[in-house]
Image: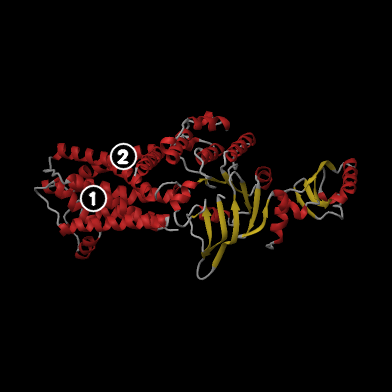
Amino acid sequence: MMSMLSHYKHVFQMQFLRNAGFFVVIAFIQILISIGIVIGFTYLIPDPSTSSILYLATGAPTIILIITGLVILPQQIGTAKADGYMEYIKSWPVKRSVILGADTTLWILLTIPGIIVSSIVAYFMFNPGYDVSWTVVPAFFLIALTSIGVGYGFSYLLSPAASLGISQVIVFGALMFSPVNFPMERLPEWLQSLHEILPIYSMAEVMRASLAASTFTAGIENYINLLLWCVLGYGGAIFILNKR
Amino acid sequence: MILDAKGVTKVFQGPGKSKMVANDNLSFHIHEGEIFGLLGHNGAGKTTLVNQILGLLTPTSGEINLMGESVLQSPTRARSICSVQPQSQIPLGFLTPKQAVTLMGKMRAREKFNPKRVEMLFEALNMGGWANTAGEKLSGGARRLTAFCMAVIVPGELVILDEPTNDVDPVRRRYLWQVIRQLTNDGTSVILVTHNVVEAERAVDRVAILHKGKFLAQGTPSEVKGSISNQMRMEVSLAKGLNEIDVPSWALTSNHKASRLMFSIESSEVPLTIEWARDNVDKGHFIDYSLSPATIEDVYVELTSEKGAV
């Protein structure tokens, strides 16, 4: 146990320092993106109602988590696979789950500045009716872990080119065709059914229910959906990492 | 015995039903403090073999034991017994050599890690000047040396070095071999994977020549050279084109590269060959010439060009 903690610490330091400059840039870009979602979409919708703004303000953190786990992370894994770093990591004298754990911590930390800054900006600009519940902490971790886990799963499984393609589809799909920044009812029925299965809708519902608890509620099915995707993603990633 | 491999075979499934035999029934062993050279062309199956020793790949058949225990039973144990310098450059990103080597040392030794060893290594390899430069700004040689230090900072019982001297300047190459020798004096064993045969010959205790997945020869350098021990190697610098001179009829194999001509002869033909060479120097055909005993490289070239397996 002590050795795993020590391994975790040193793997974390190695991975953090290796990417330090990159992480600063990513965190900064995420702050811009999340503010951009809150402010930018109000240009798209003339005279937005408070409820529209609340959708945007409570959707921005979910978008950050989706972009981190399902877009930036797969791109990083693709690069690491292509330049041989992935093979090198596999030769380290530590358990593969420790590496996955240390990397996950890094990715989670990376999302926090963007989420906090965008929420504060939205609060002071629009006062959209936040009602933050204590569930925000577990909800954040559940959504983050699901997004990161699924990102690991498909980027380990697929070739760098294929996972890059998927991540491009996700970034567009999550912004325009997913019920994150607007209600589900606006989508055609077939997309609604798809989103009942995919994790994006459940991420958005769980996040909204904890940031504006008096306006939104999430169903137990949303939590179950996220748990399943999370286990599937990490399970797949560990399986592929240990495959010989 | 550190490593004992028996009948290791690895078959990769190619496209369709085709199969690629990367390792074909390889058996060998490595003792404490021994440097074992694994020589072979690109694609001979060297890296596949190394990956099986590390437990990153499972042999199709055969067995690999590290310190008496099967690699397959505990790959994590195998990875802590072995420390590796990979063939490809490690993308260090923003890590400085000092950070990368220190963290790898802490990962391997934990609280027993002695930071003074980083200084000692950097001094031995004369790389103090780059110790605090971000990895992405380092030259290829400096990055290769950093990867080497990461492998030997807290060496496992078996250190695997895959082309450690690529990109490294000749002066630091010598320092590097000294560091490797020191490791083996402490009882660490080394697998040296390379196609730089001349360099390997001076360093290794035992050697195996791998070609198309099979060992063509295995033993101490002198044993391996046994098959051609009576041969000498003549090397000539040509002043003019090759067509102005006649390669002696007693040359066994000859090889011509730019202004260099190389051929091997039986040692009984030495006087005749020297006379022939002097004559050509007098005529102004040669700039100089040298005669030396056959090297592992000659064996290597001879064996791999015959394509046969023993």
Along the horizontal axis of the image, is B8 left or right of B242? left
Q: On the same chain: label 1 and label 2?
A: yes
Q: How many marks?
A: 2
* Label 1 CA crowd tier, 10 Å (few <14, some 14–19, many 20+): some
Chain letter of disc 2 in the image: A
Chain letter of disc 1 in the image: A
Image quadrant occupied by the C terminus of chain B: bottom right
Residue that appears at 50% across and 70% down = B16
Circle 1 sits in a helix, a strand or a loop, which is it? helix
Q: Residue at label 1?
A: A142
Numbered circle sitting on residue B202: none
Which color scheme is applied?
A: secondary structure
Q: Residue at label 2?
A: A27
Among numbered discs 1 and 2, the one appearing first in the sequence = 2
Q: Are marks 1 and 2 in contact (CB under 8 Å)?
A: no
Tag 2: amino acid? Ala
